[in-house]
Image: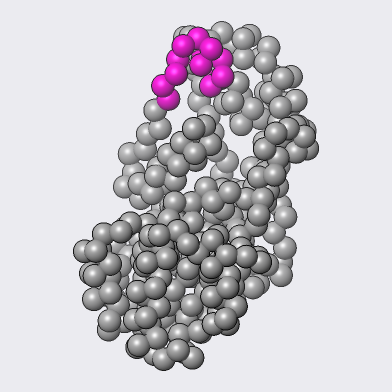
Amino acid sequence: MDSIKMNIQYVYNWLPEEDILKQGANAIACNQALYDGSREGSDFLGWVRLPSSITDDQFKEIENTAASLRSICDVVVVVGIGGSYLGARAVIDALNNSFDWLQTKREHPVMVYAGNNLSEDYLYELIKYLENKSFGIINISKSGTTTEPAVAFRLLKDLLEEKVGKSEARNRIVAITDAKKGALRTLATMEKYKTFIIPDDVGGRYSVLTPVGLLPIAVAGFDIRKLVQGAATMEKNTGPNIAFEYNLSAIYAVIRNELYKKGKKIEILVNYHPKLHYFSEWWKQLFGESEG
C-alpha cells in the first residue's frame, strides 16, 4: 500500500530545520492530548480513532445494505449537505471512471446527489430523470430539519412511493441519522426504514468513515474495507507514539504554526486532476469549518 509523501524542502527557505525540530516535543504532547481527549472540545474527537474502531459486524451491515440497494436500483440518490455528502462524493468521484454515468453496462447504480442546494431547476431535472428509473434513496441528516435535504427528500420520497408503492419504497430508503432524536429518526422509526447512526462524537465533515460515507461508497462498488484499512494505517502512523521526525501530521502542523508566527498566513490548496474536484471541496470544508 502506498503512503502519503510530503516534500518540505522549499520550506527551509523561510524556516530553518532546527526551528521545526525544536517544536517536536510540543507537537507530540499536543497530539497525545488529542488522543487522550484531555483538552477543550474533546466531545467531538471520535474521528481520531475511528478507522481502527470499525468492527467486522459494522462492515457486514453496511455491505449487506449496499448489496440490497445495488440489486434493485439503477440509480441511488444520496441526500445530504456539507459533510453529510462531500466525503462520500470525494471518494466516489476520485475512484470512478470519469464517464461513469454514460456506461451502458453497469455493475453498480448511478450515484446522484440532492439536498445540497435549493435550485428548483436542479430538483425538477432530477425528478424528471428519475421518473423512468428504478431508484433508491440514502437520506443523511443528523436532525432531519436542515432545509435543503429536508425539501429534497420530501420530493424524492413522494416520487418513489408514487412509482413503487409505500411498502416497496421502504426497501429502497435508508436513513442515516441520530441514534435517538430528531425529525428523521422519528420518521424512520414510523416508516420502518433501514437506519444507520451518525456517532455523536463525530462531526459531519469528519464523517466519511462512518456509515455517512461508507454506505454510498459501498453502493458505488468500492471496497470500503480497503479504504478503512488505509485510514487505519495512517491513524497508526500519525499517532503520538510515532517519533516526531517520522510523523507527517506533526511535522505539517509545526510547519504551518511556525510559518503563521512569521506572518505567512495564506495557504493554497491545489490539485490539477478533474477527479479530485470534490476532494478539494471536502478539503475546503475541513479547513474552513475546523479553523473558522
State how the image is colored. one colour
Q: Nearer the viewer, residue 273 or 174?
A: 174
- Which of these two is toward me, 93 or 78? 78
Point 64% across, 73% down: residue: 61
The x, y position of residue 289, in whole percent, is: 49, 39
Task: Give yes or no for residue 265 being in the magenta stretch.
Answer: yes
Left or right side of 204 for 146 = left
Q: Tell me if I can see residue 189 in this picture.
A: yes
Q: Quadrant of residue 97 in the image?
A: bottom left
Viewer-closest of 155 and 172: 155
The image shows residue 103, relative to residue 217, as above or below, that is below
- The residue under the point 72% across, 19% down is 26
Please state the extent of the stretch shown in magenta in the rendering: 255-267
* Residue at 27% from the left image edge and 81% from the top image edge: 131
Residue 107 visible in the shown view: no
Q: Quadrant of residue 253?
A: top right
The residue positioned 56% from the left and 44% from the top of the image is 2
> Where is residue 223 drawn, in percent x and y?
55, 63
72 left or right of 97 in image: right
Answer left or right for 14 relative to 224. Answer: left
How far across and how far down the image is residue 13, in percent? Answer: 47, 9
In the image, is residue 134 above or below residue 121?
below
Q: Is residue 221 above or below residue 265?
A: below
Residue 203 x %, y %: 58, 49
Q: How many marks?
A: 0
Report if residue 31 lies within the magenta region: no
